[in-house]
Amino acid sequence: MLRARLLKIEQKRARSDPLPQTDAPYTDSFEFKVESSGSKPKARRLDHHFSLDSTEQVSSPLKDSSRSARDPSKPPIITLGTARPAPHFFPWTSLSMEGLPHNHFAKVGADSAPVSMGSINGENAYNLSIAMSYGYSAGSPQVLRFATEHVELVHNPPYDDWECCITCGTTSAMEIAFRVLCNRGDWVLLEGYTYPGTIAAANAQGLRTMGVEMDNDGLSPQHLRSILEGWNESKGRKPSVLYMIPSGQNPTGTSQSAARRKDIYRIAEEHDLYIIEDDPYYFFNLGESLDSEDGPTTPEVFLSRLPPSYLSLDTSGRVLRMDSVSKILAPGIRCGWVTASSQVIGKFVSQTEAGVLSPSGPSQVMVYKLLDETWGHEGLLWWLVHLSAQYRQRRDILFRACQKYLPLEICQCDLPKMGMFLWIQVSLSAHPLAGDRSASDIEDSIYNAALDNGVLVSKGTWFAQCKNQSGYLQFRLTYAAAEEIDLTKAVERFAVAVRAEFQLGETPPV
Amino acid sequence: MLRARLLKIEQKRARSDPLPQTDAPYTDSFEFKVESSGSKPKARRLDHHFSLDSTEQVSSPLKDSSRSARDPSKPPIITLGTARPAPHFFPWTSLSMEGLPHNHFAKVGADSAPVSMGSINGENAYNLSIAMSYGYSAGSPQVLRFATEHVELVHNPPYDDWECCITCGTTSAMEIAFRVLCNRGDWVLLEGYTYPGTIAAANAQGLRTMGVEMDNDGLSPQHLRSILEGWNESKGRKPSVLYMIPSGQNPTGTSQSAARRKDIYRIAEEHDLYIIEDDPYYFFNLGESLDSEDGPTTPEVFLSRLPPSYLSLDTSGRVLRMDSVSKILAPGIRCGWVTASSQVIGKFVSQTEAGVLSPSGPSQVMVYKLLDETWGHEGLLWWLVHLSAQYRQRRDILFRACQKYLPLEICQCDLPKMGMFLWIQVSLSAHPLAGDRSASDIEDSIYNAALDNGVLVSKGTWFAQCKNQSGYLQFRLTYAAAEEIDLTKAVERFAVAVRAEFQLGETPPV
C-alpha cells in the first residue's frame, strides 16, 4: 500500500516537466499532486471568514511582472525590471552539509557514516544561485513539491483544491493565519491550556482568547458547543476561529481520539468555525502504554497507527493545518508548511509577500537536500519511526521516575501517547496552608525551589486560559531537551521541591 | 583613522567574555559597542509614537524563564522546561560553504580561489547545534556583534542608547516597523515615487500612504513642510512616520545631499516625525559623473565619500535605520539589521517574538562565517569598494546606451550617483495622440512593446504615489540583474519601443 503510493509519486515526477530554473519561480501544489484534479468536490468559499486586512490585500505589480516575463513564446528577455543582483555578485559559491543517510534507522543499531550533500551554482537539482536570490512567497518548487507529496501521502485531504505554502516556521505561520482570519477585538477559541506563543501572537494583534475546557482526550466538544450555543453578542462577535494542538498537546500532552476529532469537526461545521490545526508533535507516536513493546515498526505500520488529522477529515476546506520541521528536524531551520484550500492559501501567500517575503534560501536548500535528495519520503518516515522510538524511551524514563519519586497522594499524571510533554497536576487540598496561601504563591515556591535544586520546569499558569481547575496546580515537564541520563535525576529534584512545599518529608528509599 | 577604529574593535573583543554557548542566548548591542556608554545623551522617550499593538505587547514568560536559567551562581540546570529538541536529534552534522577570500578585491585583477568555511557541532565560534536550535529574536550574538560593530564604524549614532536587531530581511523589518509605529487608518509619508513593497506592506495593515514631491535631490523639504503645516485633521491623524530611501532611491535613483538630509531631519524634529531610513543601496557609491575616473579606492576613502546617513544625524533617537544584505551579499539569505533607540528596538524584538521569531540559523551561520570569520570589517569594506566599481561600470554602460539610443528630444534621465536604478522621464507633449490617449495607455503600450522586443522594464505608475507629474511618463531601468554585455542591447530594444509609440522613426546610425 505505502509502496504503491510511493511509486505513484515517482511516476508522477517522471511524467512532469523539470522544475523551473528561474529566480523566484511561481509554483503551486497543483503541479505536484499525484491524484489528478476533479475527483473530489471543491472547498467551500469562505469569503466571510477573511479579515479586513486580507480582504483589502492586493498582489504586487512588480512580482506579477516578473512572473509574466516567463512566457516562452516571446524572445529571451533581458531584464532591466526587478532589482535582483546578478548571481555573480553573490560571494558564496557552494553550500554543503553532512547529514544522516537514507534508511539509517531502518535497522536497529545502524551506525553508518554521515553523507555529504551540497548545492552549487548552476546545478539542476537546486541551483545555489537561485536559492540565494529572491524566492517566491509560497516557497521554492523543490521544497513545495516535497511538502505537497508528503501531505497527500499522509493526510490526503478529502476536497479537491487544497494547496501547501512553505512558511518561515509555525510562529510566523500563526501570526499570518490570525491576520488572514481575524480583526482586532475578535475572539479566538483555543484549548484551556495552550502554547503561550499562540496567546502572545493573538494578543499582539489585539485578539481576545477564550479557553475551552479539556479532559483526558483534549478539548471538550460539550464545552465548545455550550460556548457557541450560548454566545452573547454583547461580548463581541461570535468566535469564528478555533485553534488546537490535537496531538501531544502543549502543555497537557493529551491527544484527541479519532472520535473526538470527528465530534469537534461536526461542531465546526454547524457553527461555521474555521479550524487552525497546529500539529508539530503529530509524528511522535509513543504508544498507549509503558509495557506494550510493539517491537520495531515499519513506516507502513507507523502511518496506519497515526490518528486522523483534521486536514484528513476536512470535507469543507475549513482547516488550516500547520506543519513544522522544528521538532522533527531542527528549529533553527525556520521552515514549515501550511495546507488549506486555495482560497485561504492565496490570502496566506499575499500576506507573506507583504511581510516575511519567503523562507531563507539556505534553509530551503538544506531541507530539500536532506528530505528529497537524500532521504526521500520513505527515508523521512523511517526517521520519524526512529524519533518516535527515541521519544518513547525518554517518555518512559520520565514517567517511571514520576511514579517513583513524586508524592502520588497529591500528584497525578497521565501517560502521554504522543508528543513531548508530561503534565503533572498537584492537588492543593493537602497543602499545610491550604486556603491561606494563594495557588500562585505555591506554584512560584515549587518552581523556584526546583530551580534551586537544579531543574527547570514550566509553570501551569503560563499556559492557562481558563482558571476552572481551582483545586490544582499544574507543571509541564518535557523529555525533549535534557540528556536521557539526566531525566530521572531531574524528576527526583523536582519531587524534592514538591515534597518540601507540602511538608511531606523525604522520598521513601526504594 | 579607519585602521585605528578597526584596532579598537579588535581590542574590545579581546577584552570581552567569550560569546555565550547556550541555546537562544539573550544578547544586545551594548555588549559589543566599542565606545563605552555614558559619553552621549540618551535618546528621547517616544511612548506617544507606539501603536496600540505595540503598547499592549508583553514578553513571553517561557522565553524569560529560559533566560533566567542562565544564572551561574546556581547548580547546573537540567531543563524539563522549554521544548527544544536535544541537538543529537538534528539530522545535519555539519554545514559548510565556499566563498570569496578576505581582501580578494583589494588588488585589481585578483583571482584567488574560494575559501572553505564551515560550522560543526560543538565548535566554539558558531556551534552548529546552537544555530540549528531556537534562536533569540534579536539574532545570534555572533551576527549581532558584527552588525553592531559595523554600525558603530560606519554611522556612529550621536546618542547613547542605540541598539541593533537582526531581521529576516527588510520586507519583514518594514512590516514590523509599521506595526510598532502605526495604527490602522494612520497616514505614512513617503517619497512620491517609492518601492511598491513598502506601499503594499503599509496598505496590508490598513495604513494610508501619502507621497511627498521629489526633485533631483530626492524628497522635497518644502513640500514635506507644507503637508505638515497645512494638515487638516479631517483627513485623519497628522502623519507621524516618514519613510525614505535616501540613497540611490528606488525607483528614481536620486540621492539626498548632506544638506538635504539635515533639512529633512530638522523638519522631523519640529513636527515630531519618526523616520524610517530604508537604505539598501547606501554602499553603492558610483561617483558623480561618467568621466571622473578616481582610480582604485581604499576602504578609508570609500567611507569618507559616503553621505551622512539619517542614523548618523539622529541626535534624538527618532530614526529606525534598516540595513539589508540582499543587495550587498544575497537576497536569499533573508537577513538584515535595524538600528534605533533601545526603546524602539525593545518593541521591535517583542513584535518579532510574536511573529517571525528569529532569522534562519543556517543563514546566520553563513553571514557570520563570511563576514566575521573570513572577511572581517575591512574585508567587507573591500567587497563594497569592489561592488561599487562593478555597479559604476554597469551604470556607465546603461547611461551611455540611453544617451545613444533614446530619443533625447522627449526622454530625460539623470546620472544616478548611488544605487542600481536609472529613471527615465518621457515627455507626453510630443505624442501624436497627445490629449486623446491616456498616459496609462501609452505607458502600457511602450511596456508591452519593449517586452515583445525582449526587454523587461518597470512602469513608473507602479511606484507612483502622487500623480502631479502629469506631462510625463516614467520608466525604471536597473543595471543590477542583466548580464553586462546585454545592457546596451536592452536599451536599444527599449528605445525602439519608445520611438515606435511616438512615431519617431529609427535610431540614427552612429
Image: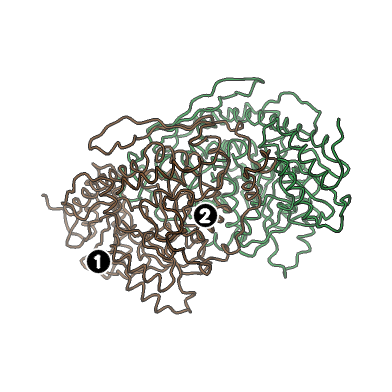
Chain colours: A brown, B green
Amino acid residing under circle 2: Gln
Judge the density around disc 2: few (<14), some (14-19), many (≥20) Cα neighbours within 10 Å.
many
The image quarter in which residue B190 lies = bottom right
Reply above or below: A47 against B287.
Answer: below
- For this view, does B437 lie left or right of residue A381? right
- Which residue is at the front of the view, A343 or A228? A343
> Quarter holding the C terminus of chain B?
top right
Which secondary structure, mark 1? loop
Residue in the picture at 30% in, 42% down = A382
- Residue A497's disc is none
Rendered image: mark on residue A428 = 1
Q: Position of residue A332 (x, y in %)?
A: 43, 43
The Cα–Cα distance between marks 2 and 1, rounded to whole angstroms, is 37 Å
Apparent side of residue A114 relative to residue B454 in the rendered image (left or right): left
Is residue B261 visible to us here?
Answer: no
- Tag 2 subunit: B
Quadrant where the N terminus of chain B lies? top right
Q: Which residue is mark 2?
A: B351
- Residue at the image position 36 percent from the left and 47 percent from the top: A327
Near-viewer residue (A77 or B364) = A77
Q: Position of residue A17 (x, y in %)?
A: 50, 42
Q: Which chain does tag 1 point to?
A: A
Q: Is residue B169 in view?
A: yes
Q: Residue at x 27, y 39 (%)?
A: A106
Closer to the camera in the image, B366 or B77: B366
Residue A209, horizontal then vertical, whole percent: 43, 67
> Which amino acid does the dot numbered 1 rest on?
Leu
